[in-house]
Image: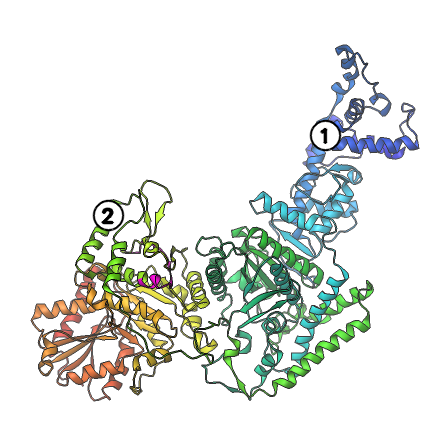
């Protein structure tokens, strides 16, 4: 009886005075209006049994008024309008259903119904539910240390309440819901509300009391998991996440699952403890404080394997790397342990790298899915997050080669540190590749090991956002924050992350909120800078200890079973440690992350040390040239200016010559015809920065209709990929480097919009491209196209900074190498990269084809021209591209001076565009017989043999190096010592060029021309160096 009375009292509307009073306070809270002392004489039909029936009818009516008889509908509407129970009842309408009878029955209801109040209350509950969905993560118990300094000034939160007591409920919800708590008061806690379709907390129930609604929302959003997803602008995705976290009982684990999780926690924890016991004074960047990372990764991999994933490419920083190698990739423990032996002799395979930078490749059976899965952990430098785009590029390549257009078979996992994830701009660049057609990997799972500290820097000093993961919001990636001291919560979140990626093929972030038990490394003292934090950490019970105590209390395992499992793994480690002492040599190749099966011999050597001719037949040149000059699609309208360009190409083909763009077309087309995939990427590469390439034609009348003639060369050709990139150098170059890692049978090129733009990708160039093979025994054939030349365009668009690339070349300037058969190929094999500055389209054609035809892979740096793209003299005959022709490392003088070398007074060595200005000046001065001009096309490795032949030919001549760059830039500092070694220091190498300067070029056109004329005068003044020592 009391329950029924309170039910009616709860529905009673506020008086006008109460409403005015409430509005004046600015909050929609209402005062209790129950009347427990009112007489129930007016309700003679009620007794203990009927009140239960009455309440059941009321709940049914709340669900849908049509689910009850019309008389019950009127009764409840009248009660809601404020009528006492006795007055609320009206007899059913007579069978005659006269309009007068119906009107009389509904008179009271029609006069007093307050549907608005009922709607407002339900809207309040809906708003409350949304508040938890939007801000629940603010008050979740995410920090295992309970010292989090996350600043939510713009989105207030409060701490701690579990029992839905109004004294704490009011304060908590007032702050959780930015505009108050929507008019809900303590008196409403037992009121039943119908749940909106935007929540799954009801499970199979569609109505719940407010108290239970709050309890379930607390359980879903405010415990050890904080779900950040309401910024996503896709309803289906939001509903999917709500269902995964709100449905009652979703986080239930079977006994077997708990035992498996315990076993993984034991391996993760005891591995670190074993290393600490054996090598306490060694840096290893252990995982202590985030041991749940290992079961997290294994859960992701298990779930993904069950969904059909066959290959996982991973990138991660140094923290926890050895543990991941041991317990996720399953690298042999003895191979890891022997890395700690300082007495091991390094194999002669390069410089090597520290153990916590090395990668690994391994194929094994996944025990959960019972399917084979290939695991690849990419080697990486200390430069945090630099490996991110490299991983994405390799993932994209593997998807491409196996025809995985939706990312169902190959996926990537990226691990991050909290400080780097927030601080490194490459994270943002990589995220913005995630949904671009030619760069998407169809979803990456990001796992952030959130130590809540960066080296010695607190988060409050390290980022401006509340979370380190906020950067992920730019691509609508859901973010799952989880307390890493709760392995079950971690496991569940990772399971959901894997299912999200498999369902939507979009990025997702798992934020493991943990701590770092030691300093930045095991030798570091963290108490200097974080004394209070580390006092707390020293008192913190280990996650394994807490977890096993929980499982023992739940009778999942016994203490004896736990101890036996620990002893079993400790024995495995000890046995591996014993075997590691038998290792005598440290082989870097055992840590290769990207093997190329079948490309090398079994011992990793090239199958041949010779390179065939890079020329092709005339028929093939004509066929490719005709495609380049055509539109191979019917009813396709191109731009009028492009019609003239294609006509010009046709004329060149008929004349058997090609310019720079056509020479590139010949190289790409011939490789494609032979089944070699070609991928050209970079800013505006489809048309070309200088409007010379036009590899993608656009229909002038149909939006987004394009034609790529290069894909119409041959029916069985390889596909050609040409793609404009985002306005990023660091991220895109890293991506293309990763793409080139996947297979040696592809020509992968990245072109800078202007050559000097590569400096924003310097980290990829320095840490991966120039030194990658030496550190990680990993060959790569990526090509960098860097437009270069002093054209009077100012300091920013002139120099590709060749001096930087040449400074990183590994050949010795003071040693003349022993010349033998196939000397040029041996030089290429032993160098760390190849640097060229081609002056003819034919040589550009050959050097691109040589990248594929040689039996090993080296990065190729090409300083490409700008003005030469349309220079009338910068054209090559088909004769220079026919079978039997090769790339010319040096192009000697072929004019009158070559016919009479004894009469030559000066030899000018140069490279690139300056050659054409020198020949023009020589002709204008009539010095064709007395001055020879020699072009060095391959700068590194330096062509010692050919340069010796040239210097020996002109024994009576001055030797001059001429360049258009400033003296402290360009090639001079690289060329001079090598030329001196070539001539055994018996002659002087003179310099003709611009003087030293801070900027690469002047911004004044007149000054540019004056400087150019001055260097030309010096180059051709035969007395310029007279009297100089």
Could you tell me if residue 796 is visible in this image? Answer: no
Neighbourhood count class around disc 2 (C-alpha, 10 Å): few under 14, some 14–19, many 20 upward: some
Front in this rendered view, residue 179 or 721: 721
Front in this rendered view, residue 684 or 470: 684
Instruction: Give the residue displayed 71% in from the left and 80% down from the top.
Output: 571
- Is 160 displayed left or right of 980 in the figure? right
Instruction: Give the residue displayed 24% in from the left and 51% down from the top.
Output: 646
Judging by the rendered image, the residue that carries numbered circle 1 is: 117
**Residue 418 position in % (x across, y down):** 58, 63
Q: Which mark is residue 854?
A: none
Discs 1/2, front: 2
Judging by the rendered image, the residue that carries numbered circle 2 is: 643
Instruction: Give the residue displayed 56% in from the left and 44% down from the top.
Output: 234
Instruction: Give the residue displayed 36% in from the left and 45% down from the top.
Output: 705
Could you tell me if residue 633 is visible in this image? Answer: yes
Q: For the magenta stretch, what is the residue range?
A: 670-690
How many numbered marks appear?
2
Which quadrant: the N terminus? top right
- Is 411 displayed left or right of 867 in the figure? right
């Amino acid at each position: 009886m009391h329950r029924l009375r309170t039910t009616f009292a709860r529905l009673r509307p506020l008086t006008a005075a109460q409403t005015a009073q409430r509005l004046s306070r600015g909050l929609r809270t209402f005062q209790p209006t129950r009347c427990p002392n009112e007489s129930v004489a007016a309700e003679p039909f009620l007794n203990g049994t009927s009140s239960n029936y009455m309440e059941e009818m009321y709940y049914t009516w709340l669900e849908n008024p049509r689910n009850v008889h019309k008389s019950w509908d009127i009764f409840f509407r009248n009660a809601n309008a404020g009528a006492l129970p006795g007055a609320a009842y009206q007899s059913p309408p007579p069978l005659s259903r006269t309009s007068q009878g119906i009107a009389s029955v509904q008179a009271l209801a029609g006069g007093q119904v307050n549907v608005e109040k009922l709607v407002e209350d339900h809207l309040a509950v809906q708003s409350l539910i949304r508040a938890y969905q939007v801000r629940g993560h603010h008050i979740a118990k995410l920090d295992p240390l309970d010292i989090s300094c996350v600043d939510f000034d713009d989105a207030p939160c409060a701490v701690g309440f579990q029992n839905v007591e109004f004294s704490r409920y009011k304060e908590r919800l007032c702050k959780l819901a930015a505009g108050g708590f929507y008019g809900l008061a303590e008196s409403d806690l037992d009121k039943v509300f119908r749940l909106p379709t935007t929540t799954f907390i009801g499970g199979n129930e569609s109505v719940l009391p407010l108290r239970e609604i709050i309890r379930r929302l607390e359980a879903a959003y405010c415990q050890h998991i904080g779900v950040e997803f309401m910024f996503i602008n896709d309803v289906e995705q939001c509903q999917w996440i709500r269902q995964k976290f709100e449905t009652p009982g979703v986080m239930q684990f079977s006994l077997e699952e708990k035992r498996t999780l315990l076993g993984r926690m034991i391996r993760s924890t005891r591995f670190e403890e074993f290393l600490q016991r054996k090598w306490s004074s060694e840096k290893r960047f252990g995982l202590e404080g985030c041991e749940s990372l290992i079961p997290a990764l294994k859960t992701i991999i298990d779930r993904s394997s069950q969904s059909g994933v066959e290959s996982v490419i991973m990138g991660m920083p140094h923290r926890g790397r050895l543990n991941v190698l041991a317990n996720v990739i399953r690298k042999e423990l003895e191979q890891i342990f022997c890395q700690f032996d300082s007495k091991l002799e390094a194999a002669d395979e390069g410089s090597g790298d520290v153990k916590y930078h090395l990668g690994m490749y391994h194929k094994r059976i996944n025990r959960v899915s019972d399917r084979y899965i290939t695991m690849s952990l990419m080697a990486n430098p200390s430069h945090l997050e630099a490996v991110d785009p490299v991983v994405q590029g390799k993932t994209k390549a593997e998807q491409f080669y196996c025809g995985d257009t939706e990312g169902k078979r190959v996926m990537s996992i990226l691990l991050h540190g909290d400080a780097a994830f927030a601080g490194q701009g490459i994270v943002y660049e990589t995220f913005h590749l995630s949904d671009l057609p030619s760069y998407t990997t169809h979803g990456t799972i990001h796992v952030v090991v959130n130590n809540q500290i960066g080296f010695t820097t607190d988060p409050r000093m390290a980022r401006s956002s509340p979370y380190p993961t906020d950067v992920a919001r730019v691509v609508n990636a859901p973010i799952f924050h989880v307390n890493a001291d709760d392995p079950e919560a971690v496991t569940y979140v990772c399971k959901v992350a894997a299912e999200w990626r498999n369902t939507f093929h979009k990025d997702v972030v798992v934020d493991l909120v943990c701590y770092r038990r030691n300093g930045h490394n095991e030798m570091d003292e963290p108490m200097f800078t974080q004394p209070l934090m580390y006092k707390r950490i020293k008192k913190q019970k280990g996650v394994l200890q807490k977890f096993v105590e929980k499982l023992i209390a739940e009778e999942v395992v016994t203490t004896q079973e736990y101890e036996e499992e620990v002893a079993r793994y400790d024995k495995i480690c000890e046995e591996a440690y014993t075997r590691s002492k038998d290792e005598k040599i440290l082989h870097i190749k055992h840590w290769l992350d990207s093997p190329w099966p079948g490309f090398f011999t079994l011992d990793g050597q090239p199958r041949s040390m010779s390179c065939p001719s890079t020329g092709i037949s005339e028929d093939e040149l004509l066929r490719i040239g005709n495609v380049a000059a055509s539109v191979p699609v019917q009813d396709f309208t191109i731009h009028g200016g492009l019609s003239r360009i294609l006509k010009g190409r046709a004329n060149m083909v008929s004349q058997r010559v090609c310019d720079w763009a056509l020479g590139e077309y010949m190289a790409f087309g011939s490789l494609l015809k032979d089944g070699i995939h070609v991928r050209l990427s970079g800013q505006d590469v489809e048309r070309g920065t200088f409007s010379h390439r036009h590899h993608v034609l656009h229909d002038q009348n149909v939006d987004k209709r394009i034609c790529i003639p290069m894909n119409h060369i041959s029916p069985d050709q390889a596909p050609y990929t040409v793609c404009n990139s985002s306005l990023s150098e660091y991220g895109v170059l890293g991506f293309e480097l990763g793409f080139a890692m996947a297979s040696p049978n592809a020509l992968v090129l990245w072109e800078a919009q202007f050559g000097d733009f590569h400096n924003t990708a310097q980290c990829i160039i320095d840490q991966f491209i120039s030194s990658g093979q030496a550190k990680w025994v990993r060959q790569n054939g990526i090509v960098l196209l860097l437009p270069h030349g002093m054209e009077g365009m100012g300091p920013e668009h002139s120099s590709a900074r060749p001096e930087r690339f040449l400074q990183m070349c590994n050949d010795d300037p003071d040693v003349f190498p022993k010349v033998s058969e196939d000397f040029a190929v041996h030089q290429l094999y032993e160098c760390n990269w190849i640097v060229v500055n081609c002056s003819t389209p034919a040589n550009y054609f050959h050097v691109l084809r040589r990248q594929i035809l040689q039996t090993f892979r080296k990065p190729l740096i090409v300083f490409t021209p700008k003005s030469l793209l349309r220079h009338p003299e910068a054209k090559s005959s088909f004769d220079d591209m026919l079978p039997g022709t090769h790339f010319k490392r040096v192009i000697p003088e072929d004019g009158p001076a070559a016919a009479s070398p004894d009469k030559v007074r000066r030899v000018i060595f140069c490279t690139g565009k300056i050659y054409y200005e020198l020949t023009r000046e020589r002709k204008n001065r009539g010095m064709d017989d007395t001055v020879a001009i020699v072009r060095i096309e391959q700068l590194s490795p330096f062509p010692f043999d050919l340069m010796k032949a040239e210097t020996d030919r002109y024994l009576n001549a001055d030797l001059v190096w001429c360049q258009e760059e400033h003296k402290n830039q360009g090639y001079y500092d690289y060329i001079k010592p090598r030329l001196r070694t070539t001539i055994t220091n018996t002659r002087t190498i003179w310099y003709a060029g611009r003087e030293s300067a801070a900027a690469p070029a002047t911004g004044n056109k007149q000054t540019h021309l004056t400087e150019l004329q001055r260097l030309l005068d010096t180059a051709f003044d035969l007395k310029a160096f007279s009297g100089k020592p």
